[in-house]
Amino acid sequence: MSWLDDTDDDDEPEFDEADVRVRPNPKANRPRTKRRPAHSDAEIARVLGVDRGRYAVLIDEDADDEHEAVAMRARELRKQPIVTGDLARVVGDTSGDEGTLGRIVGIEPRTSLLRRSADDTDQVERVVVANADQMLVVVAAADPEPRPRLVDRYLVAALDAGIRPLLVVTKTDLTDPAAFLAHFDGLDLEVFTSALDEMPVERIGAALVGHSTVFVGHSGVGKSTLVNALVPSAQRATGHVNVVTGRGRHTSSSTVSLRYRGEGGSGWVIDTPGVRSFGLGHVDPANILKAFTDLAEIAEECPRGCTHLPDAPDCAIVEAVEGGRLGDRGAARLDSLQRLLETFADKP
């Protein structure tokens, strides 16, 4: 008999559930789970603006009881960009009463997304606005001098996003914009001209009805003045141009959606801060030519794989310009196109 056989069963300890020691949860809360509520009761609201992590939203848009409320971003959306123009799903207190705060728990699918980058080599895109279907480019005929290539960039970004571009030239009382506008001959681009005492508010307003239009432009071109004329309640700050540098001062510091109401109906004016550059690092190079509709038609005659650059063999656009087919504006149009294409020549 081994010594193991000498063990007395009566000496073995007995255990039950009371003897099990459970370590208490120091935070006294439930374990986290990846399951999230469906929020079937969420309301759809338009994001009007963003200010320090708080979102102004419009509840019950177009209803008799539409009203603004303030909401914050839900934790699960911390990596989801929420921008002006988004249609958000909001829960919580959406009454809009002082001190109340709703919660954005989702974003509806977007119909368009206007983006820009810091420069053409920056792959980090900055979302400007969501769900816009028009872009109104505001340029001054003088003070500051108009920049055709900046307008070209706006057009590329708009067409890349599937947004229809429009053009307003302000301060036409200072100089004749004909030479500047000649740069855009042949484009499917509706143009408005505006002088200090002759602002075509009704014509521009008619183009805004039924649309969500994002206003873009260089600082100091009169964009905020135009917005205030279209939406008197906007009270957007206006500035002036520095007589030494020729540059405008930024007056709009944030992007905001404003309701336009005209005789023919209503629409949305989305005012953005003035910019001096508009990077296209996010743009598909194949979409650049689309912004030059007159040149794109001629490009159909180019050989397959044509780059349209100065050294491109048998390029129909180059030959058309050299042959005078596009008149005096042709060389400037081609130069602007080639500058953009050269920027993206090495982009995969």
Image (cartoon, rainbow, N blue to C red):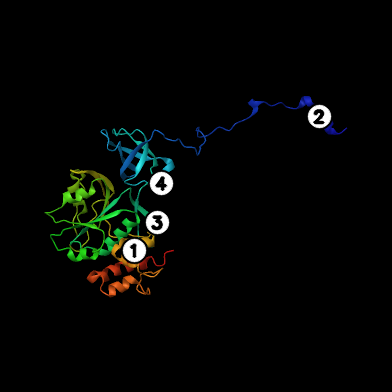
Q: Which residue is mark 2?
A: 7
Q: Which residue is mark 1?
A: 289
Q: Say which mark, if any, is on residue 45.
A: none
Alpha carbons under labels 3 and 2: distance apart: 74 Å
Q: Amino acid at mark 4?
A: Gln
At label 2, counting other C-alpha atoms closer than 10 Å, the crowd grade (few under 14, some 14-19, many 20 or more) is: few
Q: Quadrant of residue 344?
A: bottom left
Q: Which residue is mark 3?
A: 124
Lower position in the chain sequence, tag 4 or tag 3: 4
Q: Position of residue 67 (x, y in %)?
A: 27, 36
Lower position in the chain sequence, tag 3 or tag 2: 2
Q: Position of residue 298 (x, y in %)?
A: 32, 67
Q: Position of residue 200 (x, y in %)?
A: 15, 52
Q: Quadrant of residue 242?
A: bottom left
Q: Say which mark, if any, is on residue 80.
A: 4
Alpha carbons under labels 2 and 1: distance apart: 92 Å
